[in-house]
Image: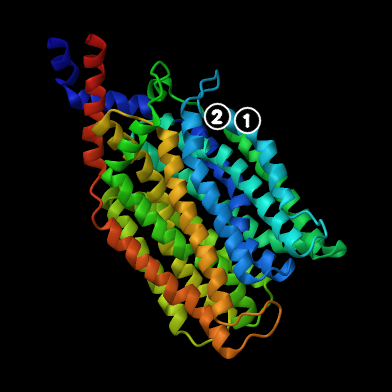
Amino acid sequence: MATNVAAVSDPGAKAGAERSADRIPLPRILGYGIGDFGFNFYWFSLQLFLAYYYTDVLGLRSEVAGLIIFLCLTWDGIIDPAIGVLANRTQTRWGKYRPFLLFGSIPLAASFTFMFAPVGLEGAALIGYAFATQVLFRTMYGLVNIPYSALMATMTRDSMQRNWLAGARMICAFLGTAVVSYFTPRLVTYFTSGGRTTGYFGATAVLAVIATVFTLLTFAATREDSSITHTKEQPPPVSELLRMIATNVPFLQIIAGIGFFSFCNMLVTSGLVYYVKYYLGQDPAIAGEAASLMQITITAMILPWTIAARYVGKRWAWQAGLAIAFAGLIGLYFSEAREVGVLYGFIVVYAIGSASIGINFWSIVPDTVEYGEWRTGVRAEAFVFGFVTLIQKIALGASSAFLGAYLGWVGYVANQPQSPETAQAIKVMITLVAAGGLIVSALVMHFYRLDARAHARLVQEIAARKPSREQV
């Protein structure tokens, strides 16, 4: 018993020592962050252009395109927790999670390009090919991205250090999305001499090669802390993992908050190209420029939001960001001007606010890992991150299905002038409908209570329990 008292008799000194030990070198922080630069060459290009590629390039009906994306994202989400379990049980000389980056990067790149291969199919065969290749890609993406996301939780236990990791990740992620948004339409044009499908195939092949390079760089630059990964403990059974999730209130709150935000943000990004082409009457490449401007703005706001979260708390920063994003969407709705400059202005306002969500979400999730460990004694980073992406991808898939059904409902016809009512309905979709999701996300996060002080206390309690277990 004396040993247990000594272990916690000076928590301040112990916490200070842990913070010093947990401080991550800047090159390692940047090495982790650049991984998401590459991942967004895949992720955001699909979020921005896949629905449009299916409807306006391949000629699929909007309802069919939305259903394919919904089913594939749902599949992606369902397998993510299973990938998390697999990653949690992996033990190699490189750690638990880094080997997935090393061995999965090239198969992931290949599966991405398969989705855009100019195979010349039509009808049911084309639908089947689109579905099968997207399922393959979503599976490979989960096998690499879930371990990458979980890697953050094994690099440090310090909540503020995780803020810097999340900040580096978000800066690189949004730089990646800016590059994708701006250059993908230009790459498509460059390769289009052989047809529109050939243009997309050439563009995605270039994106895949670049993404692979950054994935491998992240593998080389990062390290896992063996004291966190619990290499000597047996992996918990799935029943215990599910019990940990069910009793983890902060985790349930954050996945609800990100689920509603993801739904509305997908409407904005995927609907942008339809808004530009059919409401503004501009070249669809303008949508890429608007999205690029949005991502550049988000990148510029990562550091301010990281600092704001440090001083006002992650929950308040989340809600403040949603309020600003809401103002941007409502402003765009009430504006009658059909000018690109007006769109750019309101997109910037939306981006300033939405930047808060990315940084705070990826910083909060590792904190909930410790909460689950503190409450149940079960720690499983990859399973938690897999469950997070399950909810997030179901939300994104539901948003894609909604977009497709909504376009069909309002009378959308691909590559044709739309009626005034249809054009206005597209505007409503990316403004008022999306703004509703922001409101719900803010309401959910209003009740989140796991702040930095509470997290620091439970981390100390977790550390204090370990000597007790070793005494037995």
Q: Amino acid at mark 1?
A: Leu
Left or right of 75 on screen, residue 349: left
Residue plotted at (48% across, 44% down): 168
Which of the numbered marks, if any, corresponds to residue 102? Answer: 1
Which of the numbered marks, if any, corresponds to residue 131? Answer: none
Q: Nearer the viewer, residue 355 or 73?
A: 73
Distance (Cα) linking label 1 and label 2: 7 Å
Residue position for label 2 = 98
* Classed neighbour count for the residue bearing mark 1: other residues with Cα under 10 Å, few (<14), some (14–19), many (≥20): some
Counting from the top left corner in percent of width and height, residue 17 is at 29, 23
Q: Amino acid at mark 2?
A: Arg
Left or right of 162 on screen, residue 276: right
Is residue 187 visible from the viewing direction of this image?
no
Is residue 339 visible from the viewing direction of this image?
yes
* Classed neighbour count for the residue bearing mark 2: other residues with Cα under 10 Å, few (<14), some (14–19), many (≥20): many
Residue plotted at (63% across, 40% down): 214
Counting from the top left corner in percent of width and height, residue 32 is at 52, 37
Question: Which quadrant is home to the C terminus?
Answer: top left
Marks 1,2: beta carbons within 8 A: yes
Secondary structure state at the residue bearing disc 2: helix
Counting from the top left corner in percent of width and height, residue 81 is at 46, 39
